[in-house]
Amino acid sequence: MKVIEYKLYPNKIALGKLEFTLEQARLLYNKALEERIISWKEKQKGINYYDQAKSFKGKYPISAMLTQYVLKRLDTTYQRFFKKNSSFPRFKSKDRFRSIDIRQWGLNASLKEGKLRYDKMLIRTSNHRELEGKLKTGRIVKRADGWYLQVTCEVQNLLPKKKIQSAIGLDMGLKYLVADSKGNTIEAPKLFRKTETKLTKQQRTLSRRVKGSSGRHKARQLVAKTHLRIQRQRRDFLHKTSFRYAQNDLIAVEKLNIKGMLKNHHLAKSISDASWNMLLQLIRYKAENAGSYFVEVNPRYTSQKCSGCGAIVQKSLSVRTHICSECSLVVDRDTNASLNILRAGIALGGEMGLPISLKPEATRSLA
Ligand SMILES: [Zn+2]
């Protein structure tokens, strides 16, 4: 499955219709939620999707399909609430209802030659990427700087897996975002510091504006745009970094319990800033698309073990350099870990029966 995003360029009429459709869908969502709550409070009786699909049919000036999708979306949030103990569905403000689902292509929606046809609208799309594979679902999303179309398509991965001739180990760290087994370190990007300073100022302005005023509305728009910019800068950086690493035939990383780590507040800020999770997902995805192997190794001892001789060298988090008294190896702490991760990855790959044909220098210590 692959997600492609297009920017949309609706003309004035289409723009008006998109806004209208989104708003009607939101009103429907809230009304249907209200109906469920009232029915439960007054009659202790639940209403399911089929009841609502029947009673709301044709009640809102949007397509029958979209009506179903909106009710389905509410139903899904309900199910999740009951099954997974997540929070109770809430009424959606305009800020929290920003997308129009297209669950099915064909009757009501199509995407061809740089144009989206949806519900009798014809909207030009950016055309930077060609569609691959079969269209599955889509959604039209409203953002601070305009409208977008997200499309998922089914891509058949026909690439044969490669013989492994190059391999790399990656250590995700706090000081560095990544240290790799070739001795490179990549710092968490500072490039959006500037944008972040700007954001802080804009947020201060926003908090001073009177609620409901047009000044506040404008300030909120600015904040939203800056958020978006930071998000994009981060994503861009992570895409480039992950692309580089995915060029290796085998990529070894530690199996990290990121959820557990995020509970540790001390670590949490730097982890989410550093966006480890997204980086790992991107590397995995790109590696798989390139026919490379992505393996996750047990994180035990990866930082304490000496990558030169295998001796255990205990050190606390604040000790940045690995110094081995057995073989006198001196190397950056994270680089040492990445070498151990690489070795463990190759060993694991061997156990899994991967076609490894690495030259011995591929795993040589950097000392
Ligand atoms: Zn050693």
Image (cartoon, rainbow, N blue to C red):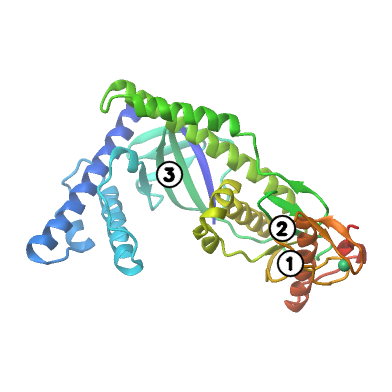
Residue carrying label 1: 302
| Label 2, residues with CA under 10 Å away: few <14, some 14-19, many ≥20 | many
SS for callout 1? loop
Q: Secondary structure at mark 2?
A: strand
**Element marked by disc 3:** strand
Label 3, on which residue? Answer: 110
Q: Is residue 309 left or right of residue 262?
A: right
- Image position of 142 (left or right of 285): left
Q: Where ligand 1 lies, by image quadrant?
A: bottom right
Q: Nearer the viewer, mark 1 or mark 2?
A: 1
Q: Residues within 10 Å of mark 3 (few under 14, many from 20)?
A: some
Q: Quadrant of the C terminus?
A: bottom right
Label 1 packing within 10 angstroms: few (<14), some (14-19), many (20+): many
Q: The residue under label 2 is which amino acid type?
A: Asp
The answer to whether the residue labelled 1 contacts the one labelled 2, judged by CB atoms less than 8 Å apart, is yes
| Residue 171's disc number | 2
Q: Is residue 200 left or right of residue 30?
A: right
**Amino acid type for the residue under numbered disc 3:** Ser
Q: Is residue 166 visible?
A: no
Which corner quadrant of the image does residue 180 belong to? Answer: bottom right
Report the front residue among 81 and 331: 331
Of the two numbered discs 1 and 3 on the same chain, state the one appearing first in sequence: 3
User: Label 1 amino acid?
Assistant: Thr
Q: Residue at x 47, y 26 (%)?
A: 201
**Contact flag, marks 1 and 3 (Cβ < 8 Å):** no
